[in-house]
């Protein structure tokens, strides 16, 4: 019995190690390519050999191709979108969990079905709506259409299911209003769900390409569009500067995930078990 358990642990450890290597390999390639000498062959460079040259390439990426401005712009509209998602999704989860209203099951079913619809199906109506409202190339124009997230509502509802309905009833008896209960009872108890949603939505919106590319022009520079433009054959840039730009673009979501990874794992596990 012990031998079987030991063998099982070894196999799981081996599979986990292989999966970790597969996931970390692209990051390591970017890091090695950035922090290497210009004389090194990029296709054969798997270990960094020049810290100073890497710093120079990162500085050139920040200044020459304006990755710094793109990072700031992306951080701004990502932050606005995440705040909007938290407000809308937490209110929707609160209503769906604790209140009964006409067509509740139908509306919840439509909400869940919307997760299966690819963005390309509704991108044209969104595009026309934003341009008719004269919000093109603005932070509001980028953020508003992305503030509705069925996944965020679902995640938050899983956390609210552990909250006894008696808490809500007791607060009503004590004279607390609808939004007072939401602000003082529901939000504090939904902390892990909020953190999980923040991390997942931040990573998703940060890497969003199609919608920012359609709705932006000269004023706002999404980092995904900026990095994609570097691959244009008509726009020559030092290959190591391109790699440095990709490395810089990857840092913010990676840091966010590393800081809050425990909450993400707990949130996904809880959602999966209850769902």
Image (cartoon, rainbow, N blue to C red):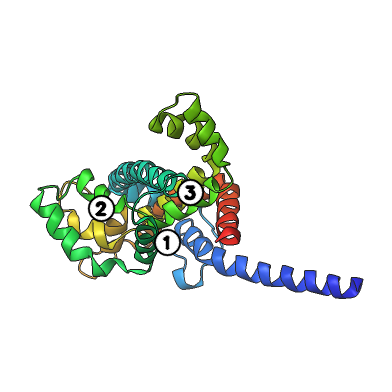
Residue beneath label 1, please? Answer: 38
> Which residue appears farthest toward the top when viewing the image?
174
From the image, which quarter does the N terminus lie in?
bottom right
Q: Nearer the viewer, residue 12 or 275?
A: 275
Measuring from the top left, give residue 231's x and y in whole percent: 29, 67
Q: Is residue 55 visible?
A: no
How would you rate the neighbour count of disc 2 (Cα within 10 Å): few for under 14, some for 14-19, many for 20 or more?
Answer: some
* Front-most of residues 93 and 143: 93
Q: CA distance from mark 3 to mark 2?
A: 20 Å
Crowding near pointer 1: few (<14 within 10 Å), some, many (20+)? some
The residue tagged 2 is: 145
Query: Residue 13's x, y, as percent?
Result: 73, 68
Q: In percent of the image, x 23 and y 44: which residue is there?
A: 139
Disc 3: which residue: 156
| Residue at the (46%, 73%) spot, across then down | 43
Is residue 273 or residue 18 the one in the foreground? 273
Tell me which label, 3 or 1, sits earlier in the chain: 1
């Amino acid at each position: 019995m012990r031998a079987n358990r030991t063998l099982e642990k070894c196999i799981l450890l081996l599979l986990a190690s292989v999966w970790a290597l597969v996931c970390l390999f692209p990051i390591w390639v970017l890091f090695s390519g950035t922090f290497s000498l210009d004389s090194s062959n990029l296709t054969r460079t798997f270990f960094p050999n020049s810290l100073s040259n890497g710093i120079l390439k990162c500085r050139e990426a920040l200044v020459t191709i304006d990755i710094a401005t793109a990072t700031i712009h992306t951080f701004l509209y990502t932050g606005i979108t995440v705040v909007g998602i938290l407000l809308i999704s937490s209110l929707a989860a609160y209503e769906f969990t604790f209140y009964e209203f006409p067509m509740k099951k139908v509306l919840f079913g439509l909400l869940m079905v919307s997760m299966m619809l690819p963005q390309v199906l509704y991108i044209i109506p969104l595009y026309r709506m934003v341009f008719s409202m004269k919000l093109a190339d603005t932070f509001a124009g980028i953020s508003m259409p992305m503030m509705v997230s069925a996944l965020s509502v679902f995640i938050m509802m899983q956390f609210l299911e552990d909250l006894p309905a008696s808490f809500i009833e007791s607060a009503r008896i004590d004279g607390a209003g609808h939004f007072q209960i939401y602000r003082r009872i529901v939000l504090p108890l939904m902390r892990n769900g909020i953190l999980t949603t923040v991390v997942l939505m931040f990573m998703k919106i940060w890497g969003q390409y199609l919608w920012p590319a359609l709705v932006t022009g000269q004023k706002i520079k999404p980092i995904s569009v900026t990095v994609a433009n570097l691959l244009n054959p008509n726009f020559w840039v030092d290959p190591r500067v391109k790699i440095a730009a990709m490395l810089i673009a990857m840092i913010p979501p990676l840091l966010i995930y590393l800081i809050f990874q425990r909450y993400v794992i707990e949130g996904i596990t809880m959602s999966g078990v209850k769902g």
